[in-house]
Image (cartoon, rainbow, N blue to C red):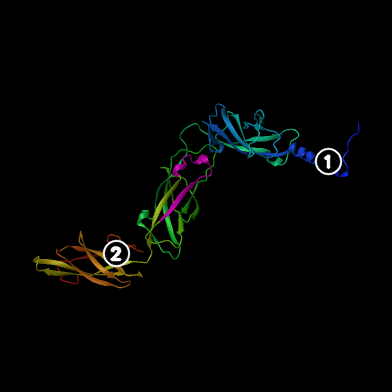
Amino acid sequence: MKLWLPNNKGRGIFLAILLLFFLVDLKAFSQECDVRILSVGYLENNVVKNLSAGVTYDPQVPRPISLRIETITTGNFCGANLAIKGIPVEGKFSVFPPLAIPRPDQRGLSWITSMFTIPAGLRYGRHTFEIKIIHAPGCKDTNPNNNSYMAHILLTAPTEECCDYGIEEVTLAEGRRLEEGQLYTPNFPSKTELAIKIRWNKIAPTYGIQCHNRLQIWGLGSQRLLLATAGLSNPDKDGIITVKPIFNLPKGLIPGQFYPFKIELLFSDKGCDCQAGNNSRTYNLKLVRMSGNDLMVNIIKLEKEWLPKENDWGIKVTFEVANVSGTETLYDVKVGVGFNIYKIINIDRLPPRKWVRKTHTITVEVPYVWVEVDPDDDIQEIREDNNKDLGVYKRDSIKNVKEK
């Protein structure tokens, strides 16, 4: 029997096919991969929760939990196990049996569930434990640096009571309500000072945790950070903290409208505050045009005047009103004149830096007279302490009882 051998051309094709099969076979049995841990949580009522957010714990007894570990594999999966080292107590720790990592899905993800026991005798606060990835023999690890994962766990007291801070009230620094308005000009940043009242529920934070609590303020719409951080002082005996931050409102806003902003409380650790729902509040600040208005009133004189209709004497009041530092003409400026009840007199037009003289007669004799400009505070001013003047009436005088 004669054995067939290919000619030179056929021999080359035959060798190429053998080489191709050899390369495919090497790739199929490649033993290079990398496995790393993405996250570690625990299951409670079939819900995966964050270990660092807090696990209730009684130091008198061990606390079993169900860990949920997520891994990701790159390359060809060739088998790996997880080794979990327990939380150390007085320098000693337990080692849990190795866990086989299941074959990953198309995305390279695998999930492992394992019972884990938190030992008795630990303090409340943060602790760590180590999880290691052990590759199967013959499996080349392309990145040994991520084979160790330190899991962080926060142990909290088994009680519903916990440390909590909440924003209670926000006003302007002078005690005025936000809707009363802040003086503002669109041409340059306007300084604003708030008074923020924060209430603490008088429950101490988790034992062993150092709290550094702060707040920040955001301007909404443009998402502008108005105040980066302001530290919170210690609460008073009633659990109240008052913060008075100063910041500038941005340029280009519209006077007369409301500017929304948000105040957020920031905590250095979750054990410092357990209720996130009262840590953020949104408010609206009214912007009042800053024009430099400053209304002032002077009583010029009080005169005794005969009133035929009443068949009696009355008091004629002469006074002057001016916008002493304003830059705009004001319209419909109200002036109250009287003893204990004001009679309102309207000044239709009040130019800036010009005194306007008016008179009014009170139909009864009274011991003194008040004259007040803008008694209802309809006009925003840079001063409010010079809007009122007092005139004292002397019965035995006919005129010019008080002159200025």
Whether 119 is among the magenta residues is: no
Q: What range is drawn magenta here?
A: 259-278
Residue most extreme to the top: 61
| Nearest to the observer: residue 135 or residue 269 | 135
The quarter holding residue 360 reads: bottom left
| Nearest to the observer: residue 98 or residue 27 | 27
Residue 386 lies left or right of residue 42; in this view the side is left
Quarter the C terminus occupies: bottom left
Residue behind mark 2: 387
Q: Nearer the viewer, mark 2 or mark 1?
A: 1
Q: What secondary structure is marked by label 1?
A: helix
Residue 370 lies left or right of residue 64; in this view the side is left
- Are there few (<14), some (14-19), or many (20+) residues within 10 Å of tag 1? few
| Nearest to the observer: residue 16 or residue 310 | 16
The circle on residue 220 is none
Number of marks: 2
Where does the image place residue 367, in percent across and percent down from the top left? 18, 62
Q: What residue type is labelled 2?
A: Asn
Residue behind mark 1: 14
Q: What residue type is labelled 1?
A: Phe
Where does the image place residue 112, in percent across and percent down from the top left? 61, 32
